Amino acid sequence: MPQQILLIEDDTRLAKMVQDYLGEAGFSITIAATGQEGLTLQHQRAYDAILLDLMLPDADGLDICRTLRAHCRTPILMLTAKGEPMDRIIGLELGADDYLPKPFEPRELLARLKAILRRGPLEPDSQVLRFGRLEIDSSAMEARIDGTLCNLTAHQFQLLEILAGRAGRVLSRDAIMTLLKGESLAAFDRSIDVHVSRIRAEIEDDPNKPRRLITVRGAGYVFARSQE
């Protein structure tokens, strides 16, 4: 079975050229013309690698990279017409595995793609956060209480992960919205309070008296470090 590659690129001519060339090399290429489409496709199925354009019509490729890396360890090769060293550095710091400036030779793209595929998926620094009876599994995108799965949407899980990953720190609503980049931001156009309420219904023993996800009046929310 050919390796599955997701190409997020709005230049249709370039995308077709890459699809044809890598297809002849034995890969199966799925094209997404926008960042939003790319994120949706990545959530729907597993890919062996992602080729990500930095300049997209609906989003900054760096934001897309950040969002992808928050939920998957798939190798990412960034493609960009922007050749400034700082862009390359930021992309790599956000989790991209390699960086190829445009214009590029198809043979170099193939060589770099094969190189990141040989490395395989990144191992997460910490797959599971544990707070007493609550476990938050980032790789599986699951939260469990005493082993029982919590009924959270992908967006609610991301919000929980953001708060739990910064346990003990008070996060304002503005700070939370800043951290909810890319695809997930649109899902939180309603009050964050509503989503927090739904998360509490799943992770708190008594949602009316929360001990894990606490409101700090006038400041925002804090996820408690120590819990039973």
Image (spheres, rainbow, N blue to C red):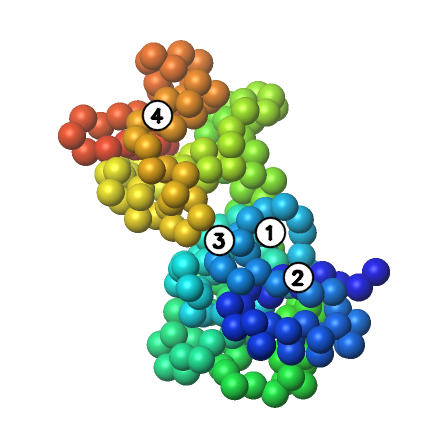
Q: Tag 1 or tag 2, which sits nearer the N-term?
A: 2
User: Regarding mark 4 in the picture, which secondary structure is present there?
Assistant: helix
Of the two numbered discs 4 and 1 on the same chain, state the one appearing first in sequence: 1
**Residue 66, located in which quarter of the rendered image?**
bottom left
Please tell me the numbered disc located at residue 194. Answer: 4
Q: Which residue is mark 1?
A: 41
Query: Which mark sits nearer the N-terminus, 3 or 2?
Result: 2
Disc 1 crowd rating (10 Å Cα; few below 14, some 14-19, many 20+) is some
Q: Amino acid at mark 4?
A: Val
Q: Residues within 10 Å of mark 4 (few under 14, many from 20)?
A: few
Sequence-wise, the earlier of marks 3 and 4 is 3
Q: What amino acid is found at the position of numbered circle 1 in the picture?
A: Leu
Q: Is residue 107 above or below residue 173?
A: below
Residue at 46% of width from left, 37% of height from top?
A: 155
Q: Residues within 10 Å of mark 3 (few under 14, many from 20)?
A: some
Please state which of residues 179 and 81 is positioned toward the viewer in this rendering: 81
Instruction: Identify the amino acid type marked 3.
Output: Gln
Instruction: Name the residue that disc number 3 marks.
Output: 36
- Looking at this rendering, what residue extends furthest in the left direction? 218
Q: Are marks 2 and 1 in contact (CB under 8 Å)?
A: yes
Name the residue: 51% across, 32% down. Answer: 153
Location of residue 171 in the rendering, given as x and y in whole percent from the top left corner: 27, 39
Q: Nearer the viewer, mark 4 or mark 2?
A: 2
Residue holding disc 2: 30
